[in-house]
Image (cartoon, coloured by chain):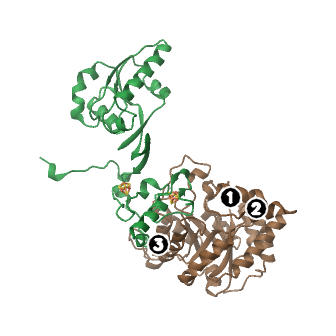
Chain colours: A brown, B green
Amino acid sequence: MKSGSKLEKVLTAGEFAVTAELGPPPNSNAEAVIKKAKHSLGVAEAVNITDNQTAIVRMSSIAAAAIAIQQGLEPVAQMVCRDRNRIAMQSDVLGAAALGVKNLLCLSGDHQCFGNHPEAKNVYCVDSMQLIAMVKQMRDEKKFISGDPIKEYEPRLFIGAVANPFADPFEFRVMRLAKKIEAGADFIQTQCIFDLDRFEEWMKLVVEQGLHKKAYIMAGITPVRSSRALKYMKAEVAGITIPDALIERMDGADDPKEEGVKIACEMIERVKGIEGVSGLHLMPIGWESITPVILEKAGLLPRPEVD
Amino acid sequence: MIVGDRKPLEEILDYIKDYKKIMLMGCGGCVTVCFSGGSKAAELLASQIKMARKQAGNEIEIIECTPTRQCEYEFLEEFAEQVKSVEAVLSIACGVGVQAMAVQFPEKHTVPGLNTKFMGYPVEHAVWEEKCAGCGDCVLEWTGGLCPISRCAKKLLNGPCGGSVDKVCEVNKDVECVWHTIYDRLKVLGKLENLTKVRKAKDWRTSTNAGQRRITFEEAML
Ligand code: SF4
Ligand code: SF4
């Protein structure tokens, strides 16, 4: 075992794994984290704790992860390259591991122009690929990126990365995934999938190259409550493809929330059947309370027992 | 070339509000080519300033001059007498020229009339784009001659990021995603394998992190 996290155990046992998501509050209210944590307790192996997502200042992902651990929830702490240099990142990796974090997801991070501090200076001292390699080196070679040794208590983390099958150039996306795996990613969570055909096409290439055997691929699904949310994402979020048919279906729904849950369940059913998909990453952005409902309806409960 | 953009007139007027006689120094180098700081730009700015001050009932005298290059002392020496005769210098060279003036004439207040933007070239008439950030450790060999440090909003070395769509950058729809272009270019060159290697974290010591950088060209030393 690389980290001994529950997520790692479920994936290595060959079970279909589930991760959910928890966005920390834009204040210092621990209760808000505790409340959201309850939605995922016992229904997912681990929960991603976002790191100042969309460049909006929120409680630190590692602090919120520590609170989640106190609630009995296993976090996947997210770490972006936007805000810290390699000194601060390695320091936070050590700190996270010391607090009991066992899964770390490495990302570039949304550019600060999308958030509430567009005046900020970004860092990108290392990029997401290099962050993955850095954390792997800390864990497996017991060395900092500078080459200095970590004599003992190296951070034992299950390393995650993201992949976006919907960004361009399409042919490069599989190549980039291969690179992330080569750099050291143990598991991959994809960008929200709405265009299942394109995802399937991408997965075919992934399987052709045998990448699904080198890292666990978890399909990202985002349930939505309204067609407005879909239209917003289509217009504003780069790298998300949303088929018009889906928007029309939501437009025509009598109860959009119920329809959103139904659509999410159908999508989960379909991704489960795609070769090479090892798990689900459910991202109900700002709608964490729906997590257990969807997982129940999708037949993913109860979760498998692993030791 | 170094590309600069003129500061707003209001800001410039504020810098020189206490002076009655100034020197307006253009530069015959890069900023002449990008229209922001040559003799023509100096002439235009001088007349704008004079008009504004006249309207305000507070006239100002301006001596205009445009040396070949403002960033080398030897081109500045000839203006020593004129500089002595004014209260301040308004420079519309790049930031390098402004500093050369400030050092050559330490007793004079030298103020900038441009915002120095970047190193780049024109992509069409009167449009310039940034192309190099002077990172001090050039990677153009394996990127198909396109710079990810100055042109990618995240300075990625293993791009493109997940926000690259339809060849444009997620940060600005008017800007191409340089990583998409690098991909296309390497495909044409038959060198896509350049992108399969994980590129190691950059050593930023060569960049602006260690303070002012200095180069000595040994062979030219006397
Ligand atoms: S890699 Fe560095 S030196 Fe080369 S063009 Fe880009 S910024 Fe300039
Ligand atoms: S879209 Fe392209 S240029 Fe823009 S930040 Fe991403 S990789 Fe860099």
Contact check, label 1 and label 2, Cβ < 8 Å: yes
Residue at disc 1, secondary structure = helix
Q: Which residue is mark 2?
A: A247
Provide the chain ID for the residue under circle 1. A
- The amino acid at mark 2 is Ile
Q: Quadrant of residue A300?
A: bottom right
Q: Gap between marks 3 and 1, in whole Å?
A: 33 Å
**Residue farthest along the left direction in this orientation:** B222
Say if labels 2 and 3 share a chain: yes
Mark 2, chain letter? A
| Residue A144 can be seen in this image | no
Q: Secondary structure at mark 3?
A: helix
Q: Position of residue B51 (x, y in %)?
A: 46, 17
Q: Chain of mark 3?
A: A
The kind of residue on which mark 1 rests is: Lys
Of mark 1 and mark 2, the one earlier in the sequence is 1
- Disc 3 and disc 1 in contact, CB within 8 angstroms: no
User: Helix, strand, or loop for circle 2?
Assistant: helix
